[in-house]
Each structure stands twice: as C-alpha cells, then as structure tokens.
Amino acid sequence: MNDDILNEKTVLLNARAEDKEEAIRLAGRLLVDQGYVEPSYIDNMIEREASLTTYIGNSVAIPHGTEEGKANIRRSGISIVQLPEGVDFGDGQTAKIVIGIAGKNGEHMEILSRIALVASDEANVAKMVEAGSKEELLSMFQGGS
C-alpha cells in the first residue's frame, strides 16, 4: 500500500476509547486531518456502524462511510488506531485495531482486500496490537511481517 493512502500521519498508537463510537471518531479524525475526507464523513462512518457492524473478527474493525458518504471523500485513505486495551464493538466482540477506510473511484474493494489479507491472520493482528512504533505497524501493510 502506498504512502498516499497509508502513512505515519494516519496511525495512532496506544489509543483509548470509551466505546466504539469514540474509536470510530478517532479513526475518522485521522482521515479528516490528512485531507482524505470532509469532516461530515465521520458521521457517515457512525451511521454505517449503526446499521451494520464493521467488526470483522480477530480483534479488527474496519469502519467506513455509507454509500451516501462517498460524496464526502476527497481521495482514498486509510487510518489505523491501535487500542491495546480494546473497545467493545457489541455482542462481546472487542476490537484492538480499528482501521478507517475512505475509498474513492472504486479503490474501496482493493483497499479492503489488502486489509483482509493482513487481518485474517491472528499472528499479524497480534503484531499490530503489540507494535511499538508506527513503522512497525505500517510494515504489516507493506509486505513486511
């Protein structure tokens, strides 16, 4: 994954969130701050979560906006929030890695498939949760392990 989509500025280590909405807002704020999305996209992410959970298993959630929210995406980007203590995503599911996604011009599926490859391996997720640096966490998405 290239630096235009994912870089150190869109990674937050050792974060804490009281609930899944706060965790999603943290991921969304990283996307806003780096110019990937309009601020209203964060509300689109919350709306999506209210209708369908974005928790995918292995302690990972991938919040993203609604179909209508695509209009609030400036360019494709990914944010990663590391929550070592985890946050409840409902039904006893705890997310320790929250990956915010904004996909422009059909890039959404390509981004999701790359994330799914990394997140489907429990050992990879454990490394992301334990990563002590942004570089270490990012290496998981750049072919490193």
Image: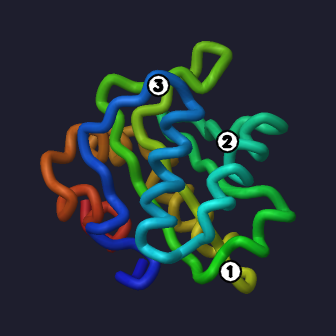
Which corner quadrant of the image does residue 135 belong to?
Answer: bottom left
* CA gap, disc 2 and disc 3: 13 Å
85 displayed left or right of 61: left
Q: Which mark is residue 104?
A: 1
Residue that numbered label 2 is attached to: 54
Closer to the chain start, of discs 1 and 2, is 2
Numbered disc 2: secondary structure: loop
The residue located at (66%, 74%) in the rendering is 73
Closer to the chain start, of discs 2 and 3, is 2
Numbered disc 3: secondary structure: strand
The residue located at (26%, 56%) in the rendering is 137
Please state which amino acid type lies under the numbered disc 3. Val
Q: Quadrant of the C terminus?
A: bottom left
Residue 122, percent from left and from top: 41, 39
Residue that numbered label 3 is attached to: 87
Residue 142, percent from left and from top: 33, 73
58 displayed left or right of 125: right
127 displayed left or right of 47: left
Q: In this view, does 89 lie above or below 124?
A: above
Which residue lies most toward the front here? 39
* CA gap, disc 1 and disc 2: 19 Å
